[in-house]
Image (cartoon, rainbow, N blue to C red):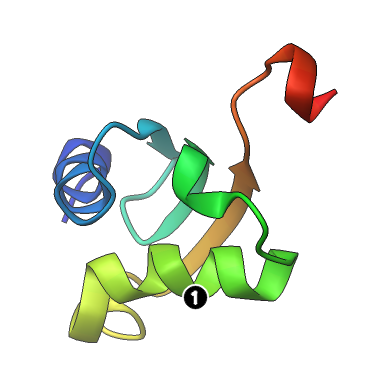
Amino acid sequence: MDSNAIEQLIRAGLPNAQVKVSSDDNVHFEAVVTSLAFAGKNPLQRHRLVYATLGELLGGEIHALSIQAKLPETPENN
């Protein structure tokens, strides 16, 4: 599993999201996900949305995933 594959999975599960995934070892990953799908959701709900896009890969091929789940910067969201 690599960063690009994870980015594609997250984008497939959260259409129109901006996604950036990085990793130094292809086991521990950091994701920054920006999506309007996060509107009205608390941080745990946002993370669960991202986790759902990866399914059984979490805890397997993806040993650890750090997530920043953000709303797009717009005047309404500031």
For the residue carrying disc 1, how many other residues have a C-alpha within 10 Å: few (<14), some (14-19), or many (20+)?
A: few
Q: How many marks?
A: 1
| Residue, far right | 78
Is 6 rendered above or below residue 43? above
Residue 37 place in picture, x, y as percent: 46, 50
Is 23 rendered above or below residue 64? above
Q: What residue type is labelled 1?
A: Arg
Q: Residue at x 27, y 41 (%)?
A: 3
Residue 54 place in picture, x, y as percent: 25, 69
Q: Which residue is drawn at 68% across and 15% down?
A: 74
**Which quarter of the rendering shows the C terminus?**
top right
Q: Residue at x 25, y 41 (%)?
A: 7
Query: Regarding mark 1 in the picture, which secondary structure is present there?
Result: helix
- Judging depth in this view, the residue of 75 and 62 nearest the camera is 75
Is 12 rendered above or below residue 21? below
**Which quarter of the rendering shows the N terminus?**
bottom left
Q: Give the side of residue 68 with respect to residue 30, left or right.
A: right
Residue 64 place in picture, x, y as percent: 48, 70
- Judging depth in this view, the residue of 69 and 77 nearest the camera is 77
Asked if one can make out residue 35 in the rendered structure from this viewpoint, the answer is no
Is 60 rendered above or below residue 5? below
| Residue, far front | 76
Asked if one can make out residue 64 in the rendered structure from this viewpoint, the answer is yes
Residue 48 place in picture, x, y as percent: 49, 75
| Residue, far top | 75
Q: Which residue is drawn at 28% across and 49% down?
A: 14
Give the residue number, with chain letter if any, for mark 1. 48
Q: Give the side of residue 13 with respect to residue 70, left or right.
A: left
- Judging depth in this view, the residue of 58 and 77 nearest the camera is 77
- Judging depth in this view, the residue of 6 and 45 nearest the camera is 45
